[in-house]
Amino acid sequence: MAVDPLIELRDVNKHYGTLHVLQDINLTVGRGEVVVIIGPSGSGKSTLCRTINRLETVESGTILLDGKPLPDEGKDLAGLRAEVGMVFQSFNLFAHKTVLANVSLAQIKVRKRKKEEADKRSRQLLERVGLADQADKYPAQLSGGQQQRVAIARALAMSPKALLFDEPTSALDPEMINEVLEVMQQLAQEGMTMVVVTHEMGFARSAANRVVFMADGKIVEDRTPEAFFTAPESERAKDFLSKILKH
Amino acid sequence: MKVLTDNFALYGEGFLGTVQLTVYASLLALVLGFLMASFRVAPVGSFRVFGTVWVTVLRNTPLTLLFFAVLLGLPRFGLVLPFQVFAVLALGCYTSAFICEVLRSGINTVPTGQGEAARSLGMSFGQTLGSVVLPQAFRSVIPPIGSTLIALAKNSAIAGAFSVTELLGTYKTLNELGYSIVWTFVWIAVGYLIITLSISLLFHVLEKRYGVAR
């Protein structure tokens, strides 16, 4: 287990109506660790990811970030969210703002940086994700892969302690998946703490420290990628892997 | 034609009265409507209830009844103001309910992911609404807000029945003076057209300027 836990979930439960989407979830993510969550659709992996910055509330159990429990609504919660970046499946770039303004907005509003200072940092981050030349375009003028890289730059702009990725490549053309995964690989190598919900098994294998396999709202396996992919323990995981690795 | 030239001052006064009522009540309606729309999407339950009650009561009350309530009701509670101010209050509050609903439907056209992204970056409810959601909602609500304000301009005629100087009310004086009723009303209609077409034009320009396709 991780020596220095950054994110801890203890006995977390959540229902959607009668559907028990999260059942007694216990998960610890150490500082600098990359945890990939995989599993069939509807297994609760996206919900789990979204509970970590409280975009989804939980009914019971505790979630600790850096040893402190998640605050309820209000200023404290906003403060926490600024520390945990999130990248969404549908990018969710602000449609009415340029790429540069997308990356700068929260720096100015939340971190209270000056506009010039924020823009400078934004340009550096756009450079880092390879999009410095797109700064003045609007999101709709970019390809999906480019939009997702902007979204990563936007999350990084807050200097978060951890990044959550909710199926970051699921809405992308196969050609564009790699450009996003490369950025994520790079972040992983730099020691960013990441929780990644994905169907990209290649990424899980190469970048993850641990693979968490979820099914029907439960964590079924939590192991190293090597162990998980070569010798899954549960029938459910074997079945899942046989289906996705067949093609 | 003689009706207009002979009584230009009277028409002018009425026209100005209607313009004043329209402008002040529009401003009040926009401010209150904006506030109520924020209430209706607020994370705090009691705000949402207040917003809902406001809209339900005002939108479902006939405007004439609301005028009676304000002009005759409020003085009973010791609040005595000029009739024109009362008229602006009644018109503004009434229209704010419609503005609120227009704004809210605009807010609903903005994908939820936009708000989620803003919140995930640590922005507060107010910042999310003000910097991300409303600017995008604004684009789709320009035409219906224009319609609502045109309706307000025409509704202001009711104030005439409560002895507030406005355009429609001028017909009483002119009628007594023996002018042709038809021409009296034709010129009144022209006056209303000037106001409503100006609002149309203003909103057309706004739509051209801000109503960018997403």
Image (spheres, rainbow, N blue to C red):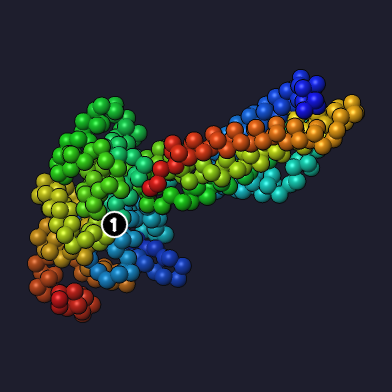
Any part of residue B149 in sight: yes
Residue A132 percent coordinates (x, y): 17, 39
Task: Report the label total.
Answer: 1
Residue at the image point whose x is 29% and y is 26% from the top: A114
Residue at the image point whose x is 21% and y is 65% from the top: A199
Describe residue A17's horizontal placement relative to residue B197 as left or right.
left
Any part of residue A224 in sight: no
Where the C terminus of chain A falls, by quadrant? Answer: bottom left
Considering every residue shown, the one lying at the far front of the view is: B1
Q: Quadrant of residue A2?
A: bottom left
Nearer to the camera, A204 or A95: A95
Q: Quadrant of residue A130?
A: top left
Nearer to the camera, B157 or A150: B157
Secondary-structure class at tag 1: loop
Where the N terminus of chain A falls, by quadrant? Answer: bottom left
Q: Is residue A171 above or below residue A6?
A: below
Amino acid under label 1? Gln
Describe residue B34's horizontal placement relative to residue A186 as left or right.
right
For disc 1, the marked residue is A89
Describe residue B54's horizontal placement relative to residue B137 as left or right.
right
Q: Is residue B25 above or below residue A176?
A: above
Mark 1 Cα-neighbour bin, 10 Å: few <14, some 14–19, many ≥20: some
Residue A175 percent coordinates (x, y): 16, 59
Residue at the image point whose x is 67% and y is 36% from the top: B193
Describe residue A223's horizontal placement relative to residue B151 as left or right.
left
The chain containing the residue under callout 1 comes to A
Q: Quadrant of residue B167?
A: top right
Residue A121 percent coordinates (x, y): 21, 33
Residue at the image point whose x is 65% and y is 32% from the top: B194
